[in-house]
Amino acid sequence: MRIVIVGFQSAGLTAAATARLYNREAEITVIERRTYATYHPCGLPFVIGGEVATLQDLVEAMPRLQGVEVRLGAEARSINTEEKTVTVLDLRTVREEKIPYDRLILATGSRALKPPIPGVDLDHVFTLRTIEDGERILAALPRAKRAVVVGAGPIGVETASALKERGLEVTLVEMLPDVLPGMLDPDMAEIVAERLVKSGIRVICSRAVKEIRGKGSVSSVVLEGEELSADMVVIAVGVKPEIELAVKAGLALGPTRAIAVDDHLRTSEPDIFAIGDCAEARCFITGRPIRSQLATTAIRMGRVAGINAAGGDETFEGVLNAVVTMASGLEIASAGLTAGAAKEAGIEAVSARVRCFSKPHYFPGAEPVTIKLVAERRGQRLLGGQVIGAGAALRVNTLALAVKRQMTAKELSKIDYCYAPPVSESIDPLVVAAEALRRRR
Amino acid sequence: MRIVIVGFQSAGLTAAATARLYNREAEITVIERRTYATYHPCGLPFVIGGEVATLQDLVEAMPRLQGVEVRLGAEARSINTEEKTVTVLDLRTVREEKIPYDRLILATGSRALKPPIPGVDLDHVFTLRTIEDGERILAALPRAKRAVVVGAGPIGVETASALKERGLEVTLVEMLPDVLPGMLDPDMAEIVAERLVKSGIRVICSRAVKEIRGKGSVSSVVLEGEELSADMVVIAVGVKPEIELAVKAGLALGPTRAIAVDDHLRTSEPDIFAIGDCAEARCFITGRPIRSQLATTAIRMGRVAGINAAGGDETFEGVLNAVVTMASGLEIASAGLTAGAAKEAGIEAVSARVRCFSKPHYFPGAEPVTIKLVAERRGQRLLGGQVIGAGAALRVNTLALAVKRQMTAKELSKIDYCYAPPVSESIDPLVVAAEALRRRR
């Protein structure tokens, strides 16, 4: 059994390690264009901000996986699905080679999206996706004074916070009406925007970038009715799946223009799997195809494809897109559908929002925790939730499990939880929120 | 509708507030011997340690619950189940009065257990249950040099840590072979014992206290083969349900000698409910009667009894006894059955233990997290788990939900979770533990 994996980030690495674990005999080959091992793109904003010391900290050591051959600096050029081979170009020797496979796993990832704004190719207009992107931004920092970050998703918010931390004058521009769109409802997003503003970041929503101006290097960003001077711009408007190889091989794409996969993560070619950012996921609640594009989804897909490619039988269920981000020290997490997303999906929903504390009021270090829960109106089956404040990520993990197990607000209000004054409140904030939701009929 | 509640701690207060919420017309009367409102016994060790400034911080302000009459300094002396009255003694005026009820809720709580050790009534031999206990210990602190804490349950461990924090020489004595018995398996308890020892506490397990010696005030504690000099002893060997009133009224007790209740928290008298430490709970997994004696169980029972007494229909399911404690700055939590408890219950179990980090290794502030999961051998349905380290309580909350929803290790290995480097790891420690358990066949 020969398993070939294209791509050596979270998805590819996990698939390789899992396949190894489930099938000791398989020959596993990983093809990766980069010349270094797996790195952590999610850590990039925190190197920019100075919390993590160097970009090199984000690069993993080469894992020792017995019987796994990792070819770095190698590009998969094409797939022959008839003879079941991948043509690989060694980028150093410029030699091509055909590698045969029994099972092929595509983990080609995604690249940062650069929208077709005039001036987007000027110097000092960056994206933040690769180690090289990080190097460029770090090199520009010492002489930068005014930065504009375009896009207020998690990476945009984290990057704006990071640049502010470095002493720059920062403006965060979002085309949609609120920060963290998709992740938060407007009433929750407001709390985040307030925190960003309080930390000194200017936040501009509901306005698109018309043009980026400058001579060689950027000097300003033009919005409707306003021109922001800037010597650095970071574009953080999302990523685009790397699907060229799959398209050339004739693999079917899904409605989101990522590679279509079944519940075993098989593509339209039964011996080819696709995982991570290049593959389409399904929303657990609506069943609709979505682009998940989270490291956690990549890892979870990698495990499933690794098992299946190695001869096992594992399914990948829909995702809740559980996600956490930091905005100027504030922890923000969400999973499942927001009230807005539920409405958009045609689900009649009800929601409740509560503000609690992480510990008893008398205990030093008690911090506010705001929770919004969303449920179906009839029967109050949970659809999702948003948490801002201490322990947001771990609280959303519990909530995501409740949503996944199709629990109702009533059931959530009756869960077992831990209490001790230095750590938690005697009534868990999730329970308080579930109680509030039960009364919202 | 007249609802009378005896006891105004977590259970009684919650029952009163909940009954009020569910029935706006009911007349609600609460009878409480203390002359002040609800206080938080779980906070006491942290006042002793100095983290919480004063004992008064632990006492809640009188809640404003419209139509709820709270009689402080009033003792319920007897119940007449025929005429449905409670005889109440006003401790100030020494006048007795009969209060009629349609529904009666007993939330009489528990008191600290003082085992019949010779010398247990010497001066400076304390328990730590009431505000008055706290006052006595705080008064003794300035002249105390050597303390012995008897019992290494959560309160004992927290009190030992607190006294060490105050600069005393502290010995913690546990009769059973390990600290936090019942809560942790020996392999996990070892981590806690190590931390306690590292912080300078002497930990002695597997030895009983034979005698406490002193003239008037304690001067030493005698174990098998050793005499520990001590000018202060704190006995923390558990609590005993306050059942006198119930017994006098002829209510049935359960096998644990707490008040027997059905799944609506009704006692053997259908119009009388019992909740909190005085009432018996059931283990969710084994179905066996247990004494839960947690504030969280009291609150959860209070809510159910409050709804039912007010005319609603709510059930109380078995408990997992989710619990968290702090040992010299280390967070320790558990829920469900330990491997030891599973064995004792005759369940063939399998377990796995993993050591992870709370954040990526490259991020400052990454802390170790050790997780032990326990599942049935056949089918790997989860039975419980133990977590030591950062976020232990919130991680156990997720785990408790997984156990409650009867999930398997495989299902837990596939949950949705949040990841961002400043907050969490790309593979959640619970998932790592569940994966390890899946491989343990």
Image (cartoon, coloured by chain):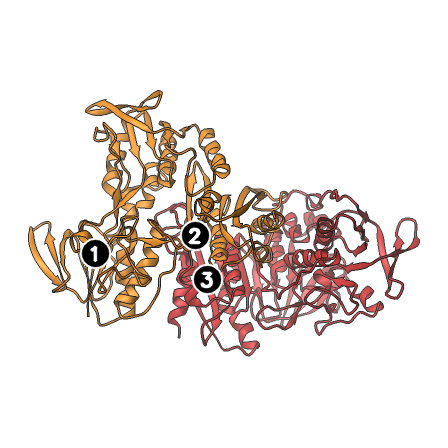
Chain colours: A orange, B red
Report which residue position mark 2 lands on.
Answer: B367
Q: Is residue A234 left or right of residue B50?
A: left
Residue A350, image x and y in percent?
54, 46
Q: Which residue is mark 3?
A: B371
Q: Residue at x 65, y 53 (%)?
A: B42
Vertical position of residue B96 compared to residue A205: above or below: below
Q: Chain of mark 2?
A: B
Identify the subunit bearing mark 3.
B
Q: CA distance from mark 2 to mark 1?
A: 44 Å
Q: Position of residue B369 (x, y in %)?
A: 44, 57
The local crowd at label 3, few if under 14, some if 14 to 19, many if 20 or more residues have their Cα within 10 Å, is many
Provide the residue designation for mark 1. Answer: A251
Of B155 and B17, the residue lying toward us: B17
Q: Nearer the viewer, residue A53 or B378?
A: B378
Q: Nearer the viewer, mark 3 or mark 2?
A: 3
- Judge by depth and name the residue closer to the eye, B259 or A363: B259
Separation of residues labelled 1 and 3 (CA atoms): 42 Å
Q: Amino acid at mark 3?
A: Ile
